[in-house]
Image (cartoon, rainbow, N blue to C red):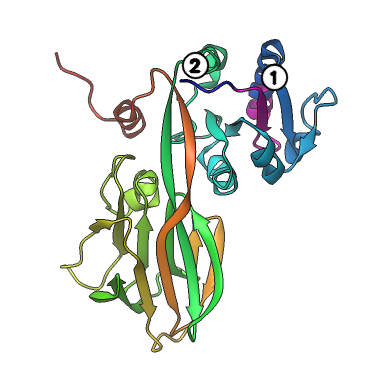
Amino acid sequence: MAETFNTVGLIGKPNHAGANESLGIICAYLKKQGCQILIEDRIADEIDCQDWPVMDIVAIGKAADLAIVVGGDGNMLGAARVLSRFDVAVVGVNRGNLGFLTDINPDDVETQLDYIFSGDYQTEQRFLLEVEVFRHDQLKSNNAAINEAVLHHAQVAHMMEFEVYIDDDFVFSQRSDGLIIATPTGSTAYSLSGGGPILTPNLNALSLVPMFPHTLSSRPIVVDADSCVRLKVSPNNTEALQVSCDSHVVLSVMPGDDIKIRRNPYTLRLIHPKNYSYFNVLRTKLGWGSKLY
């Protein structure tokens, strides 16, 4: 049975005229629906809030039945890492570039919301990564990622040495610019640019994509997402490294550190309009050919 959305949180892209226009349309729509509207604090000064509650994303996650994120995939990623911790449905309105995660067209937002509020929608669970950095067996830092975790240098075109283990089983050692560990959600992001495979969202899998490896035999590999991926950074590295989570959060890594990457216990509950098709998204965003017959 479709869920009824009575309390709706609005999360936006600050200082963006297009996003503010869409937020105004959505506010008017939700008011007609009789919804309780919660406004993210970063955008409260840019739209007419009409004395609606203003709160941060954590409070929205706790209180809302549905969160509508207006912006690009970057805005969705930032919000999703927080909202995934709560039992809230999330839908995105695309005011960015690609829009793999924010799939409602702003020119058709009211029609698509009609489908959602009438219960004619699709629900999809997307898993996250938990990224942990250990130094001398002590946890130094951790964070979550929707798309990918990337081990890399702080400077461009610097090589590093590291070993890769899957569930404590040694896989390979490598000299390269780094490694991308991507979820199916992130397989169409940075990983794709690095030559990684596209993984459909229903797969319980991770892709490991080397970045400019110093060998012709190094290739991407896909592993079970219930595995623990451990990266052992060689103490022979002479400079500090980093692990980036969705290119938003940076964790410092020192030579000799261990990095553990595994499936996060939380999942992101995405809502799609009824006509959503993942393969249609791929065709549209990646310029694939249309049907011949």
**C-alpha separation, residue under disc 2 versus residue under disc 1:** 15 Å
In magenta segment, residue 130: no
Is residue 194 visible in this depiction of the protein? yes
Viewer-closest of 171 and 224: 224
Task: Tell me the amino acid under the disc marked 1.
Answer: Cys
Task: Tell me the amino acid under the disc marked 2.
Answer: Gly
Question: Residue at point 36% right, 32% down?
Answer: 285
| Residue 183 higher or lower than 270, as above or below | below
Q: Assess disc 1: are there few (<14), some (14-19) or many (≥20) residues with their C-alpha within 10 Å of its C-alpha.
A: some
Q: Are marks 2 and 1 in contact (CB under 8 Å)?
A: no
Q: Position of residue 273 (x, y in %)?
A: 45, 21
| Residue 164 higher or lower than 4, as above or below | below
Mark found first going from the N terminus, 2 or 1: 1
Q: How many marks?
A: 2
Answer with the quarter of the image where residue 216 lies.
Answer: bottom left
- Residue 56 in the figure: left or right of residue 260: right
Viewer-closest of 88 and 141: 88
**Circle on res. 119:** 2
| Residue 138 higher or lower than 27, as above or below | below
Q: Quadrant of the C terminus?
A: top left
Viewer-closest of 130 and 249: 130
| Residue to which mark 1 is pinned | 35
Q: Which residues are magenta?
A: 5-21
In magenta segment, residue 14: yes
Q: Assess disc 2: are there few (<14), some (14-19) or many (≥20) residues with their C-alpha within 10 Å of its C-alpha.
A: some
